[in-house]
Image: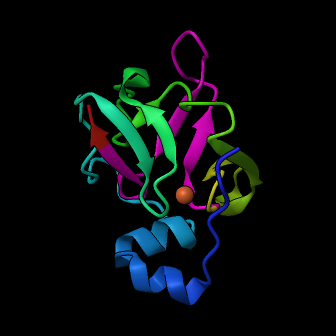
Amino acid sequence: MPTRVEKSDAEWKEVLTPEQYQVCRRKGTEPAFSGKYAFTKDPGVYVCACCGNPLFDSDTKYDSGSGWPSFYQPISPDAVTTAEDRSLWMTRTEVLCAACDAHLGHVFDDGPEPTGLRYCMNSVALELKPR
Ligand code: FE
């Protein structure tokens, strides 16, 4: 398991941009097609924008057409955690950073092989470390 990163709400607000704080700590969603990684194909590892925990490898990124960076699996099974999200009159599965509990996005079961999963992420929650 990744090492836990704990900060108070006030501390997160201080170190994050307003957009990062709204998405990662307030479970917001960036507008579709607005994020810097929506179409990125550069090779590397996407880490948590809050704490640097490695989350996704670019090899598993694909174009879902959703307007959000999409991956078919996390970089390791314990990189992320999930939680039931019943907001907005839907039941969805929220995806969080396993180290700092940042809200990253949601996972859906309409992804490509080999997993059939679509990890639909917010660009502002991620940082690409190029290879
Ligand atoms: Fe994190």
Q: Is any atom of residue 103 visible in this view?
A: yes
* Residue sitting nearer the eye, 76 or 19: 76
Image coords of residue 99 (percent x, y): 63, 56
Q: Nearer the viewer, residue 96 or 70?
A: 96
The quarter of the picture where residue 19 lies is: bottom left
115 lies left or right of 11: right
Decide whether residue 114 is among the magenta residues.
yes
Horizontal relation, residue 91 to residue 54: left or right: right
Q: Quadrant of residue 26?
A: bottom right
For the point 22% across and 30% down, the residue is 42
Which residue: 55% across, 71% down? 25
Q: Is residue 91 visible?
A: no
Is 70 or 52 nearer to us in this picture? Answer: 52
In the rendered image, residue 29 lying in the magenta stretch gets the answer no
Q: Position of residue 54 (x, y in %)?
A: 49, 43
Q: Would you say 14 lies left or right of 32 here? A: right
Q: Residue at the top extreme?
A: 114
Judge whether 16 appears above or below 116 on screen.
Answer: below
Q: Give the magenta-colored segment's residue range.
A: 101-128
In terms of image quarters, where does ligand 1 lie?
Answer: bottom right
Snapshot colouring: rainbow
Quarter of the figure with the N terminus: top right
Residue 98 against residue 25 in the figure, above or below: above
Given the current orientation, which residue lies at the most extreme bottom position? 10
x, y percentage for residue 4?
67, 60
